[in-house]
Image: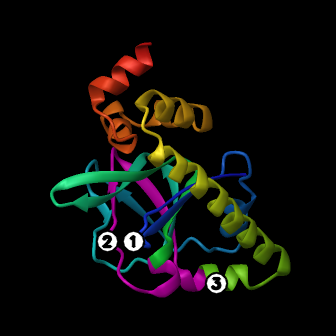
C-alpha cells in the first residue's frame, strides 16, 4: 500500500491513498454500498473551498485534483489526487471543523463519495477493517515525514529527484505548472530539471 499525504504546521491535513496495488478496500466499499453518490467536476471546479467543513471521503474514478492553501493571493499546492486515490480532509473528517484547504479539479474528474457516517459504520463493523484503517494512518505518518523532508531541502534538483523516485506517476498525471508549484520552484526550473 502506498499513501500520499501532507500535514501543514497549522494542522490542516489531507490524505490521498493510492489503491492501485490494493483495491480491496474499494471493493469492500462497493460490496457494502458505502458509496452514496457520484460527483462529476468540470475543469477548475471546486470540490471543497477553504473555510468549509468536509467530512466525506472521495474515491477518484478518473481525472485529477489539486489540494491547496491560499497564501494571501497565491496558491500553495500541497497534494494531488488522481485515478484510484482516496482523498479526505482529515482535519474536518476527524473534528467536524472547517479546514482552510481547497480541493479543485485540474481536469474533468469523477469522484465517488462516502460519508463519515457510512465510513464509521464500515470500519467499526469488523476488527480487520479497523486494522486496515490503522495501517492507513501509520502509512500516513511515514509519508508525512518524507513530505516534510521534501519541503526542507534547499536544492530544487534534490526535491525533484525525491518526488520523482517516490511517485513517478505524478509526472504522468499532473501538468508541470502544478508540479512546479508543489515542488516550490518555477515552471522553468522544473522544465530544465526534467530535460537534464
Of the image marks 1 and 3, the number of the one nearer the N terminus: 1
Q: Which residue occupies 25% across, 52% down?
A: 75
User: Residue 9 falls in which quadrant of the image?
Assistant: bottom left
Residue 78 is one of the magenta-drawn residues: no
How far is disc 2 from disc 3 in space, using C-alphas?
24 Å
Contact between labelled residues 2 and 1, with CB atoms less than 8 Å apart: yes
Residue 63 location (% of width, % of height): 43, 45
Residue 163 location (% of width, % of height): 53, 37
Contact between labelled residues 3 and 2, with CB atoms less than 8 Å apart: no
Q: Which residue occupies 50% across, 67% down?
A: 88
The residue pinned by badge 1 equals 10
Query: Viewed as shown, does residue 68 lie left or right of 86?
Result: left
Report the magenta residues as a range: 92-118
Of the image marks 2 and 3, the number of the one nearer the N terminus: 2
Residue 111 is one of the magenta-drawn residues: yes
Q: Going by the picture, which residue comes out furthest to the right?
A: 127
Which numbered mark, 1 or 3, is in the foreground of this view?
Answer: 1
Amino acid at each position: 500500500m502506498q499513501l500520499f499525504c501532507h500535514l501543514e504546521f497549522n494542522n490542516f491535513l489531507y490524505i490521498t491513498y493510492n489503491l492501485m496495488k490494493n483495491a480491496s478496500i474499494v471493493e469492500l466499499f462497493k460490496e457494502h454500498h458505502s458509496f452514496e453518490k457520484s460527483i462529476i467536476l468540470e475543469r477548475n471546479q471546486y470540490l471543497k473551498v477553504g473555510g468549509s467543513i468536509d467530512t466525506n471521503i472521495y474515491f477518484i474514478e478518473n481525472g485529477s485534483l489539486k489540494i491547496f492553501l491560499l497564501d494571501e493571493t497565491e496558491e500553495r499546492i500541497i497534494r494531488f489526487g488522481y485515478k484510484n486515490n482516496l482523498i479526505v480532509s482529515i482535519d474536518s473528517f476527524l473534528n467536524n471543523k472547517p479546514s482552510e484547504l481547497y480541493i479543485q479539479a485540474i481536469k474533468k474528474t469523477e469522484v465517488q463519495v462516502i460519508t463519515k457516517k457510512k465510513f464509521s459504520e464500515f470500519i467499526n463493523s469488523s476488527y480487520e477493517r479497523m486494522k486496515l484503517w490503522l495501517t492507513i494512518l501509520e502509512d500516513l505518518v511515514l509519508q508525512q515525514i518524507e513530505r516534510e523532508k521534501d519541503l526542507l531541502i534547499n536544492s530544487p534538483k534534490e526535491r525533484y529527484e525525491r518526488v520523482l523516485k517516490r511517485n513517478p506517476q505524478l509526472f504522468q498525471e499532473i501538468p508541470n505548472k502544478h508540479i512546479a508549484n508543489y515542488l516550490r520552484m518555477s515552471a522553468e526550473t522544473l522544465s530544465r530539471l526534467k530535460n537534464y
